[in-house]
Image (spheres, rainbow, N blue to C red):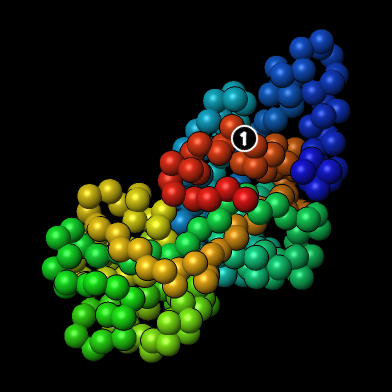
Amino acid sequence: MLRKLGAAVAAVAVVAGCGTDDAEPAAADAVSGTVTVFAAASLTETFTELGEQFEAAHPGVRVVYNFGASSALAQQIGQGAPADVFAAAAPRNMQQVRDGGDVTVEPVTFVRNRLEIAVPAGNPGKIAGLADFGRAEPKIALCAEQVPCGAAAATVFQQAGITPQPDTREADVKAALTKVTLGEVDAALVYRTDVRAAGDKVQGIEFPEAASAVNDYPIAPLAAAPNAVAAAAFVQFVTSEQAGPVFTAAGFDRP
């Protein structure tokens, strides 16, 4: 994986080997400044926790996040928004950035996620499964079709032969989940990690068609990263075994 991160990782290794016999402290000292991470909204909780761990391992380093829909983040990067790392909720959004020349190394798939139905606590709409999304009566929220959670939803509806009748299309998965937690809709199709993150505010309903639309999450340092050394170190940390328990606890699958 280190080879995939290219010259920036090499820079970490070079600095780590200079001036000391103790490689670990030197590696920590090599990473400095601010690392700006553009990440899918569904990574909010896990990346926030991992960012705190990364900062603790590299005193003086600050991790700054821009969470949002992967499609919107890819567009921002393409328009020149300054960022060091991009973590997307679908390969096609990472490919969009690669096509624009903003990522020049091979991205690494670090987690996988799948959809789950979220309903308010107590399930007041009496939602039983995916078929209810095709009925007119329940109030339904879906992600916009251009964002990964919306594209995955379209796949499962096609697989199930259901024509959904959403009352609202939201900009990202967290916005769809908020509609549920506020009781504004009877159900939303979100990631199972978002259901888990919401705690007792929502209930989750699994459905078999979700297996047909598992999302791979790729991550990569950006070619024009203002802080290339920190970017490479952050990607290395997120893809390491140390980060695994955080993702597993949140409901992600590791590849």
Whole-percent x, y for residue 79 in the image: 66, 68
Could you classify mark 1 by the number of other residues whose Cα lies within 10 Å: few (under 14), some (14-19), or many (20 or more)? few
Whole-percent x, y for residue 178 in the image: 29, 62
241 is higher (above) or lower (below) than 129:
above
> In the picture, which quadrant includes the N terminus?
top right
SS at badge 1: helix
Kindly identify which residue carries mark 1. Answer: 241
- Judging depth in this view, the residue of 254 and 228 nearest the camera is 254
In this view, the residue farthest toward the front is 208
205 is higher (above) or lower (below) than 140:
above
Q: Is residue 72 left or right of residue 226?
A: left
Q: Residue at x 16, y 72 (%)?
A: 126
State which quadrant residue 123 falls in: bottom left
In this view, the residue farthest toward the top is 21
Whole-percent x, y for residue 69 in the image: 50, 65
The reply to whether residue 211 is visible in this rendering is: yes
- Judging depth in this view, the residue of 82 and 63 nearest the camera is 63
Q: Is residue 196 left or right of residue 14?
A: left
- Judging depth in this view, the residue of 79 and 121 nearest the camera is 121
Q: Residue at x 26, y 87 (%)?
A: 135
Q: Residue at x 49, y 50 (%)?
A: 252
Whole-percent x, y for residue 75 in the image: 62, 70
The reply to whether residue 173 is visible in this rendering is: no
Q: Is residue 137 left or right of residue 103?
A: left
- Judging depth in this view, the residue of 22 and 154 nearest the camera is 154
State which quadrant residue 64 falls in: top right
Amino acid on which disc 1 is placed = Glu
Q: Residue at x 64, y 60 (%)?
A: 81
36 is higher (above) or lower (below) than 169:
above
Q: Is residue 194 left or right of residue 85?
A: left
